[in-house]
Image: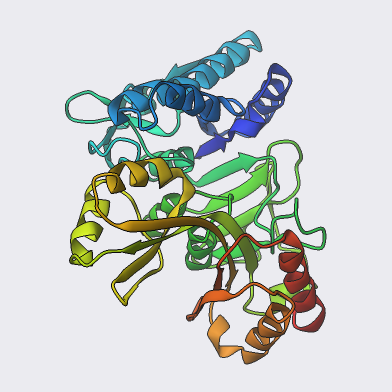
Amino acid sequence: MDTIVLKFGGSSLSDNLKLNIVAKKVIELKGKGNRIICVVSAQGKTTDKLIKEAKELSAVPNEREMDALLSTGEQVSASKLAILLTMLGHTAISLTGWQAGIYTNSDYQSSKIFNIDVTRINKELDQGKIVIVTGFQGVDKMQNITTLGRGGSDTTAVAIAAAVKAAHCYIFSDVDGVYTADPRDVKLAHKLNSISYEEMSYISGEGAKVLHDRCVELAEKYNMPIIAACTFNKNKGTEIANSFNETNEINADGSNGKHPNNKGRMEETVLKSIIKNDNILIVRIRDNKNPFDLLKRLIKNKIKIGKYNYENNELGFTINKENRAKLEKLLDKESCYTSIKPVTKISLIGSGISNHLEILEIVLKTLEEIKYSIIDLDVSACKISILFDTIIDIKYLKNMHNNLLGKIM
């Protein structure tokens, strides 16, 4: 009997109708002889709503209290799903992060899991129960509630899967896998049957809202296969793993099946996905002081920086938008000139991409259509990234994707 972990995102749990769809999928997979652990996110936009309400009280809320507040969303989802499954005749129990034995450090808002004591989870599984665990959260050594950062329920799911030595970890959402571009923006985007941990890590790290980047790192460390699939259909998902075997593809309904003979031209090349990330700010600070002093303060305040340069007494770096209020509070204490501007980064991901100059040629040709100046062009073994000095229209991503689809993929 296999143990499998199923993670359901907020869009899969947003109302009672969708909760019933989730419950049906859980029951179906349990009926195939699996021991089931579900990891759930908060319903719909609950987390966004709680953050908004907290910031109406304080521009930079206390991080410990924010973790206590935000953890409530997942508890609601877990309890509701347990109530529904029990009503449908299947014994289920909801566990908070601390009840499930998830122990973390004390880095509020972005804590790291250092251990999972699976004693309680295994006890409940041994009694035939469906175990539902709140994602995104744990507890530190002082018994304070901690959260893993936005998207952290994916990491919870993979961590639990590794700890209980599950056969697979399914990540269910409203999209049935990993695509060559966001299918909501690019109609010609198509789904990938499989992708490596390394490529998926780059895709997540560049801002694609598919999987939490830390969950991919964890899956690779413990060689835990992830299947990204859709809650609302039985389409084959995308398998993320070290290697792929046509005889052991996992379908979204839990059955085994061979990879279809994929004729998609993108699958026959190194290029796997194109991502447009508008969640970036470029910060420029003119200061005669040692720039490393400020960098150390940014790190101390857990403000993760991206592209960095220093010339002519001006420090430049990128951050994610969600860190803006924290940065501005820190800079209020500094005597320096600062500009903060939203920008776009487009990234092309694929193992060995730098060896395919025809890809770069088409990218550069597409960039000629864009009138905005390019701040940075970064070419590495698995990635081509272009950073612009403003937000650019989605049509340029579509053009790049479609040009590559027609001429290379």
- Looking at the rendered image, the quarter that the C terminus falls into is bottom right
Residue 19: image quadrant is top right
Please name whichever residue, 343 or 402, is drawn nearer the observer in this view of the structure: 343
Please name whichever residue, 184 or 178, is drawn nearer the observer in this view of the structure: 184
Seen in the image, is 244 located left or right of residue 297? right
Vertical placement of residue 211 versus 74, above or below: below
Seen in the image, is 37 located left or right of residue 184? left
Seen at 38% across and 64% down, the residue is: 317
Seen at 64% across and 70% down, the residue is: 272
Residue 57: image quadrant is top left
Residue 289 in view here: yes
Name the spot of residue 147 as percent of width and height, x first. Answer: 36, 33
Seen at 65% across and 66% down, the residue is: 246
Seen in the image, is 73 located left or right of residue 209? left
Q: Looking at this view, name the residue that lies furthest to the top.
A: 87
Name the spot of residue 14 as percent of width and height, x first. Answer: 65, 25
Vertical placement of residue 350 versus 131, above or below: below
Seen at 22% across and 52% down, the residue is: 297
Residue 132 in view here: no
Name the spot of residue 209 as percent of width and height, x first. Answer: 58, 50
Q: How is the image coloured?
A: rainbow
Residue 319: image quadrant is bottom left
Please name whichever residue, 128 or 169, is drawn nearer the observer in this view of the structure: 169
Vertical placement of residue 402 versus 229, above or below: below
Seen in the image, is 399 located left or right of residue 272? right
Name the spot of residue 200 as percent of width and height, x first. Answer: 53, 61
